[in-house]
Amino acid sequence: MNIQKILSNKTLSFLLFIGFLAMCFIFGKIFEFDIDSMRTFLASFPIVLSGIIFVVLYVVLTSFIWFGPKDVFRIASAVLFGAYVSTILVWISEMLNAVVLFCLSRQLGQEFVQQRLKLKKAKIEGVKESTGVFGAFVLRINPLIPFRFQDLIAGLSRITLFRYLLAISAPSFLRILWLQFLLAALGVSIFKNPDVVSEYLNSNPVAFRFSSLYFLLVIALSILAGIIKMLRSMRNRSLLKKAQAQV
């Protein structure tokens, strides 16, 4: 059976997708990564070449090994490159990761999910589909939502890749900047002792203000997204009733 036939079989494609997720989980439990070794390895190259190697390794490894290398790469880059340069490198890497995982999920899983959940592409006239752009923006800026989970779910939805990347580019950068700023200052201790974060914020007014504004933005956008979703749901129900009354 060739690749085209496999991809045309919705059930088999979805099983391959599930197998990929299981592989990512297993790899994360098997392989171990050391922060000092990674930092030493990257530091052995000129700064520009080191940045390119970082992006390539980040995309290749963290796309398929979800537990371990991401934190190692982020800490090592924050210590080696500093908060701002590491933010740019991680942001580029995460955007490339989003493309990889979105396309994989879209190719292997979308049609199966739509078929099983009976999600029809056709819509009742007058009821517009949600673009999903604002929703993707809000989810991306929330530090509690894993990037990989969102990328895979977006691939199963009806949002286009271009609109998805457009929606997540800015919030990804802001979220990564916030974390890299803390990692550059605290290093691996941020994961070993959470209390150092509060101690650092209390002693650093700039970091405290930035973190406060960031979380206020997350809360405000989440509330706004909830209100918009409620209003849109009410509007769609109203349009649906009108459409049914005209039949």
Image (spheres, grey):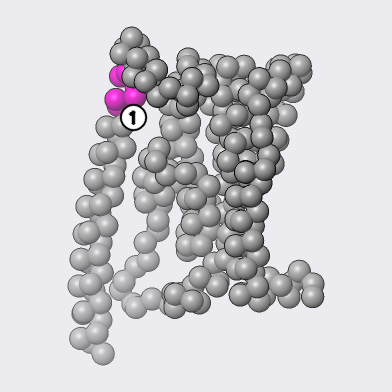
Residue plotted at (53% across, 26% down): 87
Judging by the rendered image, the residue that carries numbered circle 1 is: 214
Residue 147, horizontal then vertical, whole percent: 50, 44
Residue plotted at (40% across, 56% down): 132
- Identify the image quadrant of the N terminus: bottom right
Measured along the vertical axis of the image, is residue 213 above or below residue 100? above
Measured along the vertical axis of the image, is residue 130 above or below residue 83? below
Residue plotted at (43% across, 22% down): 193
For the question of whether residue 237 can be seen, the reply is yes
- Identify the image quadrant of the C terminus: bottom left
Residue 181, horizontal then vertical, whole percent: 46, 20
Q: Which residues are magenta?
A: 207-213
- Which residue lies most toward the right here? 2
Residue 86 magenta: no
Q: Secondary structure at mark 1?
A: helix
- Which residue lies most toward the top here? 203
Residue plotted at (25% across, 77% down): 240
